[in-house]
Image (tube, rainbow, N blue to C red):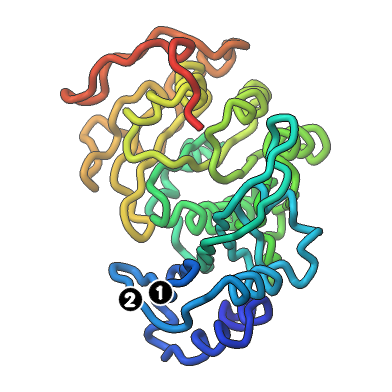
Amino acid sequence: MPWREALISRLTPEVSALLKGLDAGAAAQLRELRFRLGRPTELVYGGRSEEAPPVLDREAMEALLAALCGYSRYAFEAQMAQGYLPLPGGHRAGVCGFVAREEGQPLRMSAVTSVCIRIARALPGASAPVRPYLTDGEGAPNRVLVLGPPGCGKTTLLRDAALWLSDEQGLHVCAADERGELFAGGLPEGQGRRLDVLTGAEKPLALMTLLRSMAPQVLVTDEIGRAEDVGALLEAARCGVGLLASAHAGSLGSVLLRPALRRLFDARAFDRYILLGRESACREVWDAQGKPLKTGGRERKDGKPGSGADDNDRAQRDGLSDCGRGEAPRPLHSGDAQMPAADERPDPL
C-alpha cells in the first residue's frame, strides 16, 4: 500500500487534507510530519523543512492521537508510555507529553503536546553499498552493527539487507521487530522467502524466542543500546548466529562511550561496524577490533571488505565471556581520549 494511503487511514480529516494536497515531488521527498500544540505543522524533507497549516489546539491534538490509535487508545497505552505509536505500513509516530509512572515504571501518557510521524519507505537496493560486509565471502553471515544518527536510513538499510540475505544468499533470517518498523506492514510481494518476523515483543525476549524456536542463521533487529539487549545478543553470538543490528551513534568512538555497546565491543560480538551518512551512504567501516576497513568512502589498502573475521577474531567468537569485558582498545582517532572501563560509567537514559 502506498505510504499516503496507509497513513491517511490513521489521520484526522484536516491532517489528511494536508497530505492529499502534496504534489508527487513533495510526497516523494517527505520524511516527517511534526505537530506541536498551538503551532503550525512542520513538514520535513530530505534537506529542508517548511511550516504549513493546520495549527492544532488541544482538542485537535487529542483527535489526532485518537485517530493514530485507530480509536482504540487503550490498546496502545504501553507503546505510548514509551513515547511511540506503531502505524500501518511500518510508519511510526513519536509522542511527547506527560508520562504517569507507577512503581518507577511508565504507565501511561497524557496531555500530549507533540507528535512526530516518521515515514518509512522500502528502497530496493538500499543495502547494496554494505553487502560485501554482510557475509564472509564464502556465504557465512557476519555479525554487523550499523551506526548512524536518527534519520540517516538505518532501518531502511536493515529492511533491504534482511531481504537480500534471505532471497539472494539463501539464509534463514529472523527479524525481532519490536516497534513494528521493519516489517509490520508485511513482506513485499514475492520477497522474504526465508524471512520470519516476530513483531511487538521486547527485543531481549524476541531475540531469545527466535533463537530457540526458529533456528535462524541471521538475527535482525533495530535500535539496540539498552543493557537488557546485551545478554540476548551475546547469547546469539555464542551460538554462531549472524547478527544484523543498528544503533544510534556518530562514530565508533561514541559506541565505546556507551556502556552497553562497549560491552558488546569488548566481547567482539560484532565482526563489522558500519557508519552511515545521509540516505544510507556507507561512510566508514571497522572490523571487530576497531581497525578501519573503509574511511571517507574509500577502501583501505589493507582492508578486506568481503572477508569475515580473521583467525584471532574467530577465536574471540568462541571465547565470548559472560561479562563481555576485555582490554580497553586503543583510541580510534587521534582526537579520541582513552575511555574508562564500561563498568565505571552509568548507562545513559
Provide the secondary structure element on which disc 2 rests: strand
Mark 1: which amino acid?
Leu
The numbered mark, 2 or 1, whose residue comes first in the sequence reads 1
* View extreme (left): residue: 334
Find residue 9 and report its horizontal and vertical position in percent: 68, 80
Q: Residue at x 64, y 21 (%)?
A: 238
Answer above or below: position of 117 versus 18.
Answer: above
Pointer 1 local density, CA inside 10 Å: few below 14, some 14–19, many at least 20: many
Q: Which residue is drawn at 55% across and 18% down?
A: 317
Left or right: 266 with respect to 298? Answer: right
Q: Nearer the viewer, residue 150 or 97?
A: 97
Left or right: 334 with respect to 306? Answer: left
Q: Which of 3 and 347 is in front in this view?
A: 347
- Location of residue 243 by image quarter: top right
Pointer 2 local density, CA inside 10 Å: few below 14, some 14–19, many at least 20: few
State if disc 1 and disc 2 touch (CB < 8 Å). yes
Find residue 214 and report its horizontal and vertical position in percent: 79, 41
Mark 2: which amino acid?
Glu
Q: Mark 2 points at which residue?
A: 50
Mark pair 2, 1: CA separation: 5 Å
Q: Which of 6 and 103 is in front in this view?
A: 103
Q: Which residue is drawn at 48% across and 55% down?
A: 157
Find residue 235 and report its horizontal and vertical position in percent: 67, 23
Q: Mark 1 points at which residue?
A: 43
* View extreme (right): residue: 213
Find residue 292 and report its horizontal and vertical position in percent: 28, 31
- Location of residue 4 by image quarter: bottom right
Quadrant, the N terminus: bottom right
Residue 173 in sight here:
no
